[in-house]
Amino acid sequence: MKREKLKCEKARDFSILSVLEKSGHFPVRQSEKEAWFLSPLRSETQASFKVSLSLNRWYDFGEGKGGNVIDLVVLLKGYSVAEALAFLNGETSSFSFHQPPVKDTPPSKITIQRVKEIQHPGLVNYLHQRNIPLAMAQKYCKEVHYTCGTKSFFAIGLQNRSDGWELRNPFFKGSTSPKDICLIENNENNLTITEGMFDMLSLVTYNPMILARSDILVLNSVAFLKKTISILDNYCCIELYLDRDRTGRKATQFLLNHTHQCIDMSGLYSEYKDVNQWWVTQKEIPG
């Protein structure tokens, strides 16, 4: 049994990119970190099958599923796990499974094509993985379809106060121009500050009363700290739920030093990097 486990662990390191290319599937877009394919599992005209080259993991947004190279071979070939291992072990002599070096390509401009209510199975599943109910995400976010160069993609989007979008999906974290803070106003005298959209969604899911007693500010980047200064004076109490890494702690201290109205609330998730990392460890909630 131990020997079989070691074989599985070794097999998971075989390059997904090489398996796909050997099977006749080639990327339509590729960078140093990722490669996009027309799904090898179904028919489609726009690439929605992504391979993370750094993690050697794949995700099919159309199917709402992903995994390692063994999982892919099982689906691609209709094999059992044992047959998939035999396939991978047998192919090592005919081609390399090591990650090939890939030239990075300049980033392309993101252009928004369509904004709609979140409904794609891949995004719904992503929300489930982050422990966020669909209804809560739909209250603040949208399903954003966009192009990057000549290729089309989609993500969960949170619109900022300058009408730019923060975009998130399982393999992408980015934004459109202009990048800015997000301010959700409920006409309250209290303010809740988070760094990112999933921290905000985690908080209001954990404690819906925040929505009833507080405005919410999502920084989207600690680089926007100075932009918040003029906003802080409008509130009597400001609760800070910033990351607990070095940058986040420095930002928290900056705000605490600026005004006595600020309160550091990060003790809630003291053993985790941020709010969402803590929240996904909590009891699973219905979607």
Image (spheres, rainbow, N blue to C red):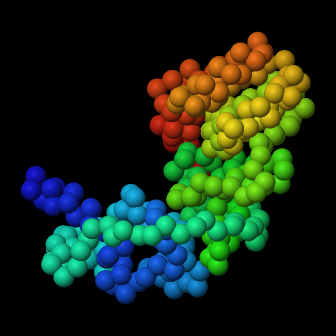
User: Which residue lies at the image location 12% right of the left edge and 59% below the top edge?
Assistant: 4
Q: Total number of numbered labels? A: 0
Residue 37 percent location from the top left of the image: 48, 77
Give whichever of 285, 50 is nearer the camera. Answer: 50
Residue 35 percent location from the top left of the image: 47, 71
Where does the N terminus fall, quadrant-wise?
bottom left
Residue 276 percent location from the top left of the image: 56, 39
- Residue at the extreme top of the image, as rendered: 260
135 relative position to 233: left or right: left
151 relative position to 215: left or right: left
User: Which residue lies at the image location 58% right of the left edge and 25% below the top edge?
Assistant: 249
User: Which residue lies at the image location 22% right of the left edge and 79% below the top edge?
Assistant: 95
Give whichever of 180, 279 is nearer the camera. Answer: 180
Is residue 29 at least partly visible in the picture?
yes
Q: Work out whether 94 lies above or below 89.
A: below
Q: Work out whether 93 lies above or below 143.
A: below
User: Which residue lies at the image location 81% right of the left edge and 27% below the top edge?
Assistant: 229
Is residue 50 at least partly visible in the picture?
no
Give whichever of 231, 156 is nearer the camera. Answer: 231
Q: Work out whether 161 lies above or below 271.
A: below
Residue 73 percent location from the top left of the image: 31, 74
Give whichever of 260, 203 is nearer the camera. Answer: 260
229 relative position to 149: left or right: right
